[in-house]
Image (cartoon, rainbow, N blue to C red):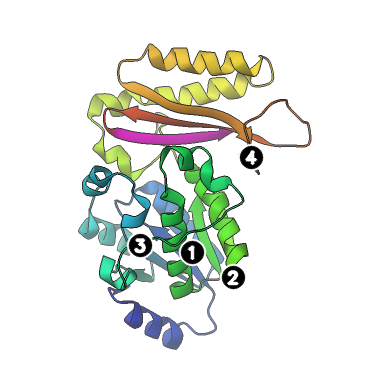
């Protein structure tokens, strides 16, 4: 496994040793878990070589404490990557990725950036777009892999690739869950043991929504979700939305030709968790 901490060394290696080889790419912010490894393992089956980046991107955090508290486990991450036979790792500094200062570009993603996560985290998707653009231009993979837990981000990255006219295939991968149903996330490491055990309620509620989506009026489904979280001492609901899977516009009525998903954001103390489910 080759590890690079500068863009120029990484690109020199790619351009000299990886010519005519199909490259898969998994961008991460570290604190790796089995969800990340599932993306890497899929990438290994579909490409000649797999590159992973580990970079905690400051421009996508609109909360300074969130950035400060984000888990940082580089040594353990590298051991995990070595164990799954990752080929190439890029671990750049902030100065390396933002030589002119950590400032976001501004993007228009057809309004997707203003919904759900965008509404509650102003500027978040400009930060995501800025770093993903930079990484994709550096790595220039054939395929890049993203998990559906960050489903809104996935749609925005697909739009970004079209906007930039990049010849890169964005591969969406299923949500990887812990045994109790909690969607795997680096932020789970910040949960207390009781919070982590009780967090099964998030997935259970989403499964209930899936069961009731076509049986009950939408308002009743929304009210049931709200009641469930108000009755739970560990979790505070930030938002719950049932939306069209392609546009993320909140559903008004079910149309047979369209697909829908339910999205949720919850606080467990100071830890913010998101999840979603196909309906």
Distance between mark 1 and mark 2 Cα atoms:
22 Å
The residue at the point 31 percent across, 25 percent down is 197
Residue 180 placement: quadrant: top left
Residue 27 placement: quadrant: bottom left
Name the front one of labels 1 and 4: 4
- Return the mark for residue 110: none
Q: Which residues are magenta?
A: 271-277
Distance between mark 4 and mark 2 Cα atoms:
23 Å
Q: Secondary structure at mark 1?
A: helix
**Residue at image mark 3:** 103
Residue 95, x across and y down, in percent: 26, 70
**Residue at image mark 2:** 166
Q: Residues within 10 Å of mark 3 (few under 14, many from 20)?
A: few
> Magenta region's main secondary structure?
strand
Q: Is residue 276 magenta?
A: yes
* Residue 29 can be seen, yes or no: no
Name the front one of labels 2 and 3: 3
Q: Secondary structure at mark 4?
A: loop
């Amino acid at each position: 496994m080759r590890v690079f901490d500068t863009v120029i060394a990484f690109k020199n290696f790619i351009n000299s040793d990886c010519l005519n080889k199909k490259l898969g790419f998994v961008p991460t912010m570290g604190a790796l878990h089995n969800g990340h490894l599932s993306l890497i393992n899929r990438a290994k089956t579909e490409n000649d070589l797999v590159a992973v980046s580990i970079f905690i991107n400051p421009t996508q955090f609109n909360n300074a404490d969130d950035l400060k508290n984000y888990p940082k486990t580089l040594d353990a991450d590298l051991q995990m990557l070595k164990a799954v036979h990752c080929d190439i790792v890029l671990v750049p500094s902030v100065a390396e990725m933002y030589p002119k200062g950590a400032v976001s570009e501004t993007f228009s993603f057809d309004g997707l950036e203003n919904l759900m996560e965008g509404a509650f985290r102003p500027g978040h998707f400009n930060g995501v777009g800025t770093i993903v653009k930079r990484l994709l231009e550096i790595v220039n993979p054939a395929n890049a892999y993203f998990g559906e837990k960050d489903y809104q981000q996935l749609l925005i990255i697909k739009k970004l690739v079209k906007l930039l006219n990049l010849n890169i295939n964005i591969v969406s991968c299923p949500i990887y869950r812990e045994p109790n149903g909690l969607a795997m996330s680096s932020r789970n490491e910040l949960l207390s043991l009781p919070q982590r055990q009780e967090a099964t309620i998030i997935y259970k509620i989403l499964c209930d929504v899936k069961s009731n989506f076509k049986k009950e009026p939408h308002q009743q489904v929304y009210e049931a979700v709200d009641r469930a979280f108000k009755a739970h001492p560990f979790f505070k609901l930030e938002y719950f939305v049932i939306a069209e899977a392609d546009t993320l516009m909140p559903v008004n009525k079910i149309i047979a030709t369209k697909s829908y998903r339910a999205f949720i954001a919850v606080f467990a103390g100071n830890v913010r968790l998101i999840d979603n489910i196909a309906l």
